[in-house]
Image: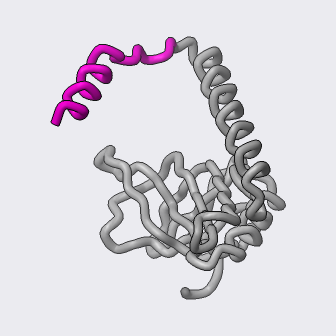
Amino acid sequence: MAGRGHDIQPEGGAAVSLGREIDQAITTFEHGAVLALIESDGYPAAFRCRPEPAADGRTLRIERPVWLGFTTGSACLMAHSHDKRGWNLRVLIAKGTTYSGTTSIGFSPAHSRWIMRNGGNPVVAMRTLLRSLAKSRSDAEVYLRRTGERPAPVPWRTIIAAKKRARST
């Protein structure tokens, strides 16, 4: 990758230490990370990347794929790894905002969270997974309360009918 911090000028952003903390964590993942965002046409896009710290210390610089039609918006950066048997799972997720540059994207993290870090212990893995599910549910409840929205109805009849059709074939 080219030099660090090119053409990214974020407006505000997260604390300096969070960007550096995420950068240091992602460097421990052999295959880098995946950035997911919404393209300018409204469709989601995701691609593998190797973020680098930007000059401002708050953002991460990501090389921009030539096919990506995008300006700014919310994004999620995720990295994960595990051994050949699926154990020793580690998952890091960072949510934030992206800023478009000519050849790169700036990712300004708002917060990050280790979802899994089990060290190969199945009991720790299960405990972490359950804690993560409870946290996700709590996050969703807070979001619904804050926005005044109601949860989307679940089409149980359609789901049950589809399961019955799948079993009969």
Find residue 105 and report its horizontal and vertical position in percent: 52, 66
Find residue 68 and report its horizontal and vertical position in percent: 35, 64
Picture residue at 19% right of the left edge, 31% below the top: 168
Name the quarter where the C terminus is drawn.
top left
Q: Is residue 163 magenta?
A: yes
Q: How is the model colour-coded?
A: one colour
Q: Quadrant of residue 89?
A: bottom right
In this view, the residue in front, 6 or 41, is: 41
Quick check: 116 left or right of 15?
Answer: left
Magenta-colored segment: predominant secondary structure: helix
Q: Where are the magenta residues, as a range?
A: 150-169
Name the quarter where the N terminus is drawn.
bottom right
In this view, the residue in front, 107 or 155, is: 155
Quick check: 102 left or right of 51?
Answer: left
Picture residue at 68% right of the left edge, 70% below the top: 26
Picture residue at 45% right of the left edge, 71% below the top: 64
Inspect this view and state whether residue 67 appears.
Answer: yes
User: For the view shown, which residue lies furthest in the front direction?
Assistant: 168
Find residue 120 and report its horizontal and vertical position in percent: 74, 63
Q: Quadrant of residue 92?
A: bottom right
Inspect this view and state whether residue 13 appears.
Answer: no
In this view, the residue in front, 3 or 152, is: 152
User: For the view shown, which residue lies furthest in the left direction?
Assistant: 169
Q: Quadrant of residue 106?
A: bottom right
Picture residue at 78% right of the left edge, 50% below the top: 124
Q: Is residue 106 magenta?
A: no
Quick check: 8 left or right of 162?
Answer: right
- Please determine whether, in this image, residue 14 is positioned above or below residue 1: above
